[in-house]
Image (cartoon, coloured by chain):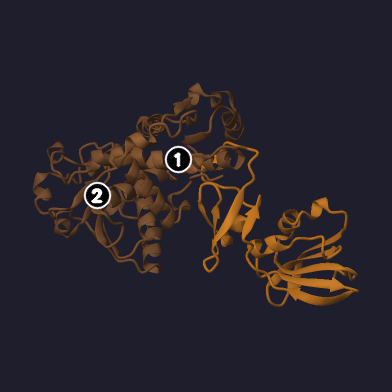
Amino acid sequence: MRHLMSPLDFSTEELDRLFTLAEDIEQNPARYAHACEGKKLATCFYEPSTRTRLSFESAMLNLGGSVLGFSDANSSSAAKGESVSDTIRVISCFADICAMRHPKEGAPMVAASRSSIPVINAGDGGHQHPTQTLTDLLTIRAIKKRLDNFTIGLCGDLKFGRTVHSLINALVRYENIHFVFISPEELTIPDYIIEMLREKNVSFQEVRKLEEVMPDLDILYMTRVQKERFFNEEDYVRLKDYYILDKEKMELAKPDMIVLHPLPRVNEISVEVDDDPRAVYFRQVQYGVYVRMALLLTLLGIEG
Amino acid sequence: MLNVGKIEEGFVLDHIKAGKSMSIYKHLGLDKLDCTVAIIKNARSGKMGKKDILKVECDINTLNLDILGFLDHNITVNVVKNCEIVQKLPLSLPKEIKNVLKCKNPRCITSIEQELPHIFVLTDEAKEIYRCKYCEEKYGSKDSFKI
């Protein structure tokens, strides 16, 4: 039985198969409409995350399966003090597969070790959020038709941004990727990632100004400066509007550059950019559903 | 000068940092073994000034010493048979350590689920880095006694 805890759990060949399946689902949704009939997905969300939960539920419903679950710890037995280990044993009797979001890091791994059904980590604290990374990779592959040979700019909060760290770790496995880190001094990429890139001989550069690198980028991955990461309001207010992607900056970019964002956005991307065909962050949400559909099929061992 | 007799079969753990022998005693689980143990604290040492020594009289196959590599790899492990030192064991970092360190990350699942074993996996042998199996929080082997 297979679980998904980290984006690196799958080899690049396995990811290739997963993305090919996701793209087939996109092209032929009717073929998969009953693939999970009779199967149940449990969404165990110990902290609210409407977007991720609905994406999982939508994925299972698209496959003809059904969903059950809870959307915060207060409405689960955790409020009565039940351990994750016990909860997953119980859930294993109710469902065929489980997607778990938990504020404590490693909770889905504990669940997986006790579970008799596949467990998907749907986000554990600041640790991992593998289905977001799979979504990002599928979006790039589906639109750019490749996962190698490009320059990707990562912009915004590179210090605390879990999605950014995961995406870098996933992308270094592909050939000839050049990373451009665009962040304010206070939110630069952590040292351990820089060390890892140096060890693997991956090329990268760090800059402060988005404008100066816009013409070089094939992909721009924007992130939100997260309020909850700051201890003082003053720092947050000063840094939250450090980068705003607008029409003017988009004019500097290549005609086939694409802009991704894990969403939700606050104001780091001006709404005027939404109509630009290069802004693919809402398509990215759709790819998130396709990749979760492919993942459910793969972990359940169901052939398309 | 204090004299402690020879052991027939077992281990002499020499060059333990002064004052750390009780910690080693605990981590090796010697309190649970029905064997003779001599704990020598603050013995004179030409190399270290002061050192601790543990003498354990036991079947040499009953004791797992892997954890010593993590706790302090400067410890000399002498294997004794028929009252003679027959081997000096080299110490290396164990691949995994269990319930020796406690994960200090307040966001780690081990902070709320009491029954979980605290497991750390060796991720970088050259830099002596271990990571919590659950949350991947980083720990250096040099932190070992601080916890």
- Residue at x-position 60% and y-position 48%: B102
Residues at marks 2 and 1 on the same chain = yes
Three-letter amino acid code at disc 1? Leu
Q: Nearer the viewer, residue A170 or A234?
A: A170
Res A297 label? 1
Chain identifier, colour brown: A
* Figure check: A167 above or below A123: below
Comparing marks 2 and 1, which lies closer to the viewer?
Answer: 1
Chain identifier, colour orange: B
Instruction: Return the x and y of residue A9 as percentages of the image width and height.
Output: 48, 52
Q: Secondary structure at mark 2?
A: helix
Q: Secondary structure at mark 1?
A: helix
Mark 2, residue position? A143
Residue A297 visible somewhere in the drawing:
yes
> Does A123 sit left or right of B39 as displayed?
left
Three-letter amino acid code at disc 2? Ile
